[in-house]
Image (cartoon, rainbow, N blue to C red):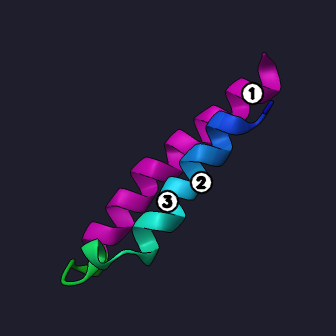
Amino acid sequence: MFWSQAREQFEEIVSWLDSDSICGLEYSQIESKLLENGYELLRRLLKTKIF
């Protein structure tokens, strides 16, 4: 429960990568979305650690 927000973000990233919605996207588009969601995951991990 303590890490639930970070875990939720991680699961969203994995689900998105596993879905058909990335089919047809360019590598750079996938990378850009991963960077955006990855930073959010890191932010949530840091927030959980600090608070």
Report the residue marked by disc 3: 13
The local secondary structure at tag 3 comes to helix
Residue at 80% x, 30% y: name it.
2
Residue at 41% x, 65% y: name it.
16
Whether residue 24 sits left or right of residue 3 in the image: it is left
Could you say which is closer to the camera, residue 7 or residue 47? 7
- C-alpha distance separating marks 3 and 1: 18 Å
First reached walking from the N terminus: tag 3 or tag 1: 3
Image x and y of residue 47, in percent: 69, 25
Image x and y of residue 10, in percent: 59, 54
The local secondary structure at tag 2 comes to helix
Could you say which is closer to the camera, residue 8 or residue 33? 8
- 7 above or below 48? below
- 26 above or below 14? below
Question: Mark 3 is on which residue type?
Answer: Ile
Report the residue marked by disc 2: 10
Image x and y of residue 39, in percent: 52, 45
- The dot on residue 48 is 1
